[in-house]
Structures are given as C-alpha cells and as structure tokens.
Amino acid sequence: MGKIVLVTGAARQLGGRFVRRIQRDPGVDRVIALDAVTPGHQLGDAEFVLADIRQSAIARILAEHSVDTVVHLDVSAKASGAGGRTTVKETNVIGTMQLLGACQKSPAVQRLVVKSSTNVYGSAPRDPAVFTETTPPKSLPSGGFAKDAVEVEGYVRGFARRRPDVAVCVLRFANILGPEPDSPLADYLTLPVLPTVLGYDPRLQFVHEDDVVDVLEIAAREPRRGTLNSGTFNIAGDGVLLLSQCSRRLGRPTVPVLLPAVTWVGTALRTIGMTDFSPEQIRLLTHGRVVSTVQMRETLGFRPRFTTAETFAEFARSRGPGLLPPERVGRAVGRLEELPLGGGQAGTTHSTHGAR
C-alpha cells in the first residue's frame, strides 16, 4: 500500500494546493485533508476531515487512517476563519503540541514535515548580513507569529529527540508571495500608500507559491538519491529586493515615518482592519532579513523556479496598477537622487542590511 498522507491547514489556499498536488504522486495511496473550517476550494479526491488540531481527537484520526506521513501547514500569521490573534496563537502553538503528541503515540507515523518561517531569526540592527540555518538570532522574537514559529520549532525538536525513528523536515520559508498570497506582508504591500520607516531601506527575500508547493512535495517523499530531506532548511528565491524597489515596481508611493511613530501607524491600520501591521513586521520593514539557501540546494536538492524579483513581479501583476505608474515613480526617484540632498546622498540613510 502507498503512503497515507495527512495535511493540516487544508482550508487555506496553500494547503488546498498541496492537497491537490500530492494526490498526483503515484506513491501516495490516500490523502486526508484536515482543518477546523470547511474549505472554500476543491480538494480533489482527498478525504476532508473537519477537526481542530487543538483537540485530542487528532490522535484518533491518525490511528483510524493509519497515517504514515504528516504535513503540518496550519502554522500561519493569519486566522483562516473567525478569530483574532489569540485563535491564531492557539492553533499555531497548542495545535502543534497536540499534533506532535498524537504523532509520538502513533507507531505508523514515519515522516513529519512542518511549515515554519524565516521569522524565527527575528530582525535586529546588528543581525548578520545573511542567516544560515545554524545562525542564532541576535534578538529572539518577543511576540506575534515570529514567537509562535520559535515555539513550534522548539516542540518539533523535542519530538525529534523522542522519536528518532521519524524523519522530520522543517522548512523555513521566506515571505511567500504570488498571485494569491495570504499574509500580513502581502496585505501591507497592497495598501495604496506604503508607510515606511524614515531612514531605512530593508532588504527582503520572497518565495513563490508554486515553489512552496514543489518543495513541500520533495519534503513529503522519500529522499532522492544524493539528497537528504530530514533537517531544517531555509527556503527562498535567489536575490533580494529593497523595499524602495518593491514600492516602485508596485507603483505605490511611500510615506516615511519616524520610527517612534510607526507603532501608532500600525495600531491605526490594525484598528480599521486594513492590515496586521504588527511589531515584528515593523522590525522587518526596518532592518530586513536575508537567509542563505545553500543547504536548500546542496542537501535538499531543491532549486526554485522563481527568483525573488520574479516572484514579486507575479505578485505585482496580480495586485493591479498602483496610484502611480511604476515608470513614473522610478523616474521621479532617479531625479531626486541626482539632487545634492537626494536619496543617494544625505537625504536617505539605508539600513545596515541595505548597505551590505
């Protein structure tokens, strides 16, 4: 009999895409799609189970279906249904604890894949130019989704120690973008005018939705010859973009705000429901973050089809035109940089990351 794969977070756009993809694998016999809310998209021939991973019923589900591969995608910065930050944290942390507890008791489970984030590295002024998988953060995230991701990975490491017979793969994704993104950063980049931190121009990395699905499939399979898909891997497209480049390509003007006032702006945007402009996102848009993908290529054997710039271009096309044509924004910025006090000299100070 082929593999029996359980996928959490199936109601999310990314989870639904992976459920439909993994069904086409000839080595997969059945797919169990699980979520606490009913998905609004098709799941193909997968069996959908309406269940909350925060509840102990997850152990019964694993046993009833003899699941041997678990792909945990229900770790996210946004709620998939009703509920705010508290619901998200409970699903991320408590839900992961329950799921891992169930996996530990199940003798059938042989492989575990966990969706994580490069948010675990945080964003701080003295960060290294590039994070590797073994680089400790200069400042541990103190709240929000970043802290959730750190806690989730801690529980996963504990599970791996208790069940060394299970192949565990943790994928730390950079900011996921594409035609149908579902993240606070995508919401921020969709604003008509982008509030930025005065004097900073952070470096950003992106990974395309299609590449996310591709690498999840690699992680859920048996490793290919000459590769290893157990361990922790950074996943990102080649290259980086400055936030200023992103705004120009979107045709969305920026409004530089003094750092102390950014928190107030974020609170205002959250209050009116435009975007979750959280403190961790403010730090990212101040200091940026870049990760090494050497292990992704050399050990995992995965090469993304989209670069960071190509991923962002796909996202920009899906958002439609901004307030200003990108060409006009670029020409205006170019003229300003030619002035004695323009952005290229005393008028703008790039963040430490932007200068490296």
Image (spheres, rainbow, N blue to C red):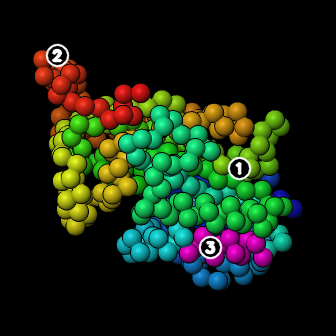
Q: Where is residue 59 in the image (x, y as percent from the top left)?
A: 71, 79
Q: Compared to 101, does 186 lie above or below?
A: above
Q: Give the secondary structure at mark 3.
A: helix
Above or below for 105 versus 138: below
Asked if the residue under mark 1 is in contact with the one under mark 2, i.e. CB atoms within 8 Å, the reply is no
Q: Which residue is drawn at 37% across and 55% down?
A: 280
**Tag 1, which secondary structure?**
strand
Mark nearer the N terminus (3 vs 2): 3
Q: Hey, which quadrant is residue 182 in on the image? A: bottom left
* Residue ID for mark 3: 97
Structural crowding at the residue carrying mark 3, measured as other residues with C-alpha within 10 Å and reported as few (<14), some (14–19) or many (≥20): many
Q: Name the residue under label 2.
A: 338
Instruction: Identify residue for label 1.
Output: 231
What kind of residue is marked 1?
A: Gly
Give the distance between the C-alpha atoms of the residues marked 3 and 1, in whole angstroms. Answer: 19 Å
Q: Position of residue 206 (x, y in %)?
A: 46, 40
**Which kind of residue does numbered mark 2 sit on?**
Glu
